[in-house]
Image (cartoon, helix red, strand yellow):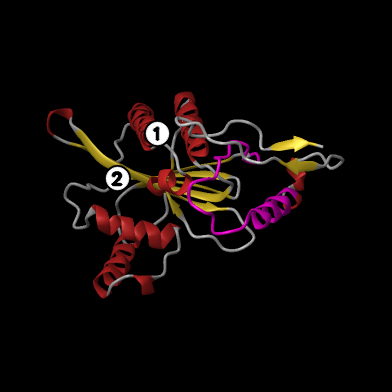
Amino acid sequence: MGGNIVSTSARMRELYKEIQNSLFDMIPEKWNKIFLYASVIDGINSLETGEMYFYYIPKGILKREPVNVYEVPNKFNLEESSYFKMADNLYGIIKKLRKEYISTNGSLWTNIIISIADCTFKVEYGFENLATSPYSNYDRHLVFRYKYLKTGLNTYSKREKQMVIDYIEREENSSIRKDIYEESIYTAPTKNLVNFEKDAPTKSRKEERMEEIYELEKDSEFWPHDKKYIILESKPKSKNQIINTNKRWKEK
């Protein structure tokens, strides 16, 4: 089933930009793709419930596995409460987008999928009644991983595999509305990089440098062709520091 093109207000475009910046700030390494899922369900007495998660695909010469946002603090030795506050703020922006969407388009979406890949920002608005859906949050998470993260069905149980197949078939034949917004964006080379320490990295520092140099050369259109760069060593991370905002690259 295809999607309808949505009307977009100036405020919605501002919120799209805020979402993009929040996602970029929460990823502590270079990445290729980002995929986010969020839901908002209206309950009794205007009580809103829902969930949010997102994954990113790290950039590298070799194929890299998706990283779950909730694994980031442990993976990069970050202060959890501050990092998860950033996640809460991102979810808050998404709820603001929902309210603005109602004002602009006159309808209420229940779930949203955001993709950032190949310099394209895409938003898919879903209108299924999640409160009465035959599928659980866990089911939808499995479908999300299959469709967007390319998780193989062979990694699922027999029941999960059949559920995913049934879900997608039902979705393709459904008359439930789906709206789509899409725009081209420019994603500059990552400069807000997290310091790596605590747990020993799986790759040596030399291997990491080789990958970083390769990425600079491969993405050379973003950099002056007549300048050379050297890689700076990471500095010790202070207790409450989340993201190192110092430039990692310095002209030689």
Task: Where is residue 92? Give x, y as percent.
Answer: 35, 30
* The residue stretch that appears in magenta: 188-216
Question: Is there a contact, CB below 8 Å, between mark 2 and mark 1?
Answer: no
Image quadrant occupied by the C terminus: top right
Which residue is label 2 attached to?
127
Task: Where is residue 85? Give x, y as percent.
Answer: 36, 32
Q: Nearer the viewer, residue 160 or 4?
A: 160
Bin the neighbour count of mark 1 within 10 Å (Cα to Cα): few under 14, some 14-19, many 20 and up.
many
Query: In the image, 251: left or right of 84?
Result: right
Q: Nearer the viewer, residue 123 or 75?
A: 75
Task: Where is residue 109? Give x, y as percent.
Answer: 31, 40
Residue 220 falls inside the magenta stretch: no
Mark 2 belongs to which amino acid? Answer: Phe
Q: Is residue 11 visible?
A: yes
The residue at the point 69 percent across, 52 percent down is 209
- Element carrying mark 2: loop
Residue 209 falls inside the magenta stretch: yes
